[in-house]
Amino acid sequence: MSQLRVIISGGGTGGHIFPAISIANAIKEINPKAEILFVGAEGRMEMQRVPAAGYKIVGLPIRGLIRPLWKLGNLGVMIDYLKSKKLAKKTIREFKPDVAVGVGGYASSATLNAAHSLGIPCLIQEQNSFAGLTNKSLAQKAQKICVAYEGMERFFPKKNILLTGNPVRQALLDPNLTKTESAAIFGMDPDVPTILLIGGSLGARTLNESVLSHLELIAKSPIQFIWQTGGYYNKRIMDELEQKGKPANLFVTDFISRMERAYKAADLVISRAGASSISELCLLGKPSILVPSPNVAEDHQTHNAMALVKKEAALMVKDADAKKDLIQLAVKTVTNPEKLKELGKNALSMALRNSATIIAKEVIKLANKEEK
């Protein structure tokens, strides 16, 4: 066939963007001459992250529905959706893709609906154990649905489902990383039990409050903490630590650029239960305590976390209980080598490897109009 042309759409959060970029990279590894165009939502993080990864992106004036759905503002949301679908159609006609890929998020709804109406074969990738609204609405229009969890036939046509796992950032799997070198970056002793606490954007508030309310316990504990606060909260946290006194065994930063180093240094990870985070923890065989965010659609993070908890591959603390219980449980767990070993082993058993490459091959099959 002629030069492969692929549109990839979706975003809004890192949980959508990282898999999308990983899929694009895998396509380029298989077919270096492939042309890939991203379609995202104006003003969202994909508009910076995708160009930084070396790909072109078109922005749509699309935004999410306002809940409850009867709110008057949704009239404007629907007008923006229609504008976005029109722009998506124009983009597709000009780019002439062989296949369209949706990874969830506002933009993928307009883009894949437009692609389907123009006869372009579609593939969607669902990261979560509880399917998002966008992907559920696209289910009947996609020839292939790549999922990360078993039992997804309750959301999608079984004949089109392929269990692939979630693509992750390739740097995390660098075999040359050592714990000693990684710990040194954070000023840590590699022989002392270490907890990595990953706060990100606005969803980090509960995790941050959990630390701030247990500074005395942290200071007295025979362990080390690497704490990513998220940029939004960092200044207030640093001011509070200056007043109360920062424990010497607490490394604090707004953002960790070398997350592979932080994972390698850690014996236990505290994280929200986003799909990408869980996939990374499983691939690395990292023991974890998951705190599902209550501020996500259809409580999908609790479903994600429970998929691991049921297999004794992670512990879970509810958001409402975290401020009181999280740090105490973390200290107890990280000083229990047998529990860490059990959690890590069970997490590793749930890992699905080479996800990006498997998905990329399915994308290319669809573009070539090959049968399953």
Image (cartoon, grey):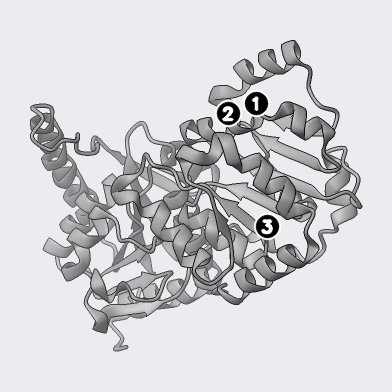
The alpha-carbon separation of the residues under discs 1 and 2 comes to 5 Å
97 vs 17, left or right, is left
Residue at (17%, 68%) from the top-left corner?
141
Q: Which residue carries the number 1 mark?
A: 212
The quadrant in which residue 212 appears is: top right
**Badge 1: few (under 14), some or many (20 or more) residues near its Cα, within 10 Å?**
some
Residue at (76%, 27%) from the top-left corner?
216
Work out whether 315 lies above or below 322.
Answer: below
184 vs 285, left or right, is right
> Hey, what amino acid is under mark 1?
Leu
Lower sequence index among marks 3 and 1: 3
Q: Which residue carries the number 2 mark?
A: 209
The answer to whether any part of residue 269 appears in the image is yes
The answer to whether any part of residue 32 appears in the image is no
Lower sequence index among marks 3 and 2: 3
- Disc number for residue 362: none
Query: Helix, strand, or loop for circle 1?
Result: helix
**Badge 3: few (under 14), some or many (20 or more) residues near its Cα, within 10 Å?**
few
Q: Which of 368 and 134 lies nearest the eye of the viewer?
A: 134
The alpha-carbon separation of the residues under discs 3 and 2 comes to 30 Å
Residue contact between numbered discs 1 and 2, judged by CB atoms under 8 Å: yes
Q: Which of 237 and 172 lies nearest the eye of the viewer?
A: 237
Q: Which residue carries the number 3 mark?
A: 171
Residue at (47%, 31%) from the top-left corner?
202
